[in-house]
Amino acid sequence: MLTVLLSSPRVAPGLLTWQAWSALRAADRVLAGSAGHPLIPALTAADVVPDVVDAPSSDGAALAAFLSAAVASAEDSVVWLALPGETADPALLSALAVPCQVLNGSPDLPGAHLLDLVSIMDRLRVACPWDREQTHASLLRYLLEEAYEAAEAIESGDLAELREEIGDVMFQAFFHARIAAERPLAEGGFTIDDVADTLAAKLIRRHPHVFADVSVSSAADVNTNWEEIKKAERAAKARAAGADAGAAVAPSALDGVPFGQPALSLAAQLQRRAQRAGITVPDDGGDSVGDALLRLVARAREAGLDPELELRAAARRYADAVRERERLSGGPEAAGPRPVGEITLR
């Protein structure tokens, strides 16, 4: 029996599972392909001394033949120490002439791979000329672009694309944190760990029904509590800002609304905040395009719809109709200019 023992470079050598240690102690031979394998000192200290062998490393079939022969000549089982971070090579496993099991001796905790991103970001900031020059301001457009690309992947239902786009959004968060870490703490600097701590504290604070003794019976109750907690947070921030400025700053239901978001989303969020605060702003009867759009936003909200998503869906239908017309006419050049009214949305 051959046991391929996997280990993580993010876990201290020797911190192996009980199953891994049992396999190592029961093995007739423990093989390592390099004298520098990180597990060797820890295993040797535990009286499990690996044999360093000159095994082929780049050819899966050759390594399979080598390990098969090692098992055939052993009295019992053989453990092969894969390099930390290596996965079980399907080509190697399929080419083996002996029974084999793959054992993950030091599995990572969920999220452990984020440490790799921290290391990569640190290196990029130092070694890449483009990355060295970036600032929070210069990266702003990329943050927005990546968020929209992730939104498009969600709308299209492409999970493989979503996996990649979420990574791009995550990269922006790591990049901004790395830039901020270069500032002293007294000047507002922070690290990626500070970001994580702030987020963790916020999630715990805003979920007292999970982390404290608050009882809820529905998602609506959760939302009500969430809004009350946010209201208290805004008031606390206003008081802190007033203390810093030496004068009282009146809190507003609109505090924290990002005005840089798309206009329809902004209008909807302003209306939601005002409604929750019990504030009614009379329609002044203006007939500008903006006034008309604002009334449409209110109508969408009354119908339980998100105006931003509704317009995005309509824009997609419009784009599909344009492409269909182009297909039927032989391409954009052949289609020629046509009145907008000829394009019928499905």
Image (tube, rainbow, N blue to C red):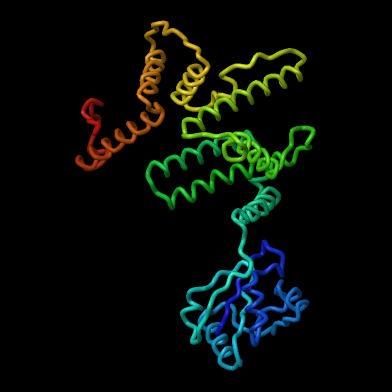
In the rendered structure, the answer to whether residue 206 lies left or right of residue 299 reads right
As displayed, is residue 263 above or below residue 188? above
Residue displayed at 37% across by 9% down = 287
As displayed, is residue 57 above or below residue 147? below
- Residue 304 sits in which quadrant? top left
Residue displayed at 64% across by 69% down = 17
- Residue 291 sits in which quadrant? top left
Number of marks in the rendered image? 0
Give percent across and percent down for residue 256: 59, 24
Quadrant of the snapshot with the N terminus:
bottom right
As displayed, is residue 344 above or below residue 127? above
Q: Foreground: 307 or 21?
A: 21
- Residue 236 sits in which quadrant? top right
Give percent across and percent down for residue 69: 56, 90
Q: Foreground: 144 or 230?
A: 230
In the rendered structure, the answer to whether residue 135 lies left or right of residue 183 reads left
Give percent across and percent down for residue 275: 48, 17
Quadrant of the snapshot with the C terminus:
top left
Q: Foreground: 223 or 239?
A: 223
Residue displayed at 30% across by 33% down = 318
Determine the residue located farthest toward the top in the rendered image.
Answer: 284
As displayed, is residue 99 above or below residue 177? below
Give percent across and percent down for residue 46: 75, 77
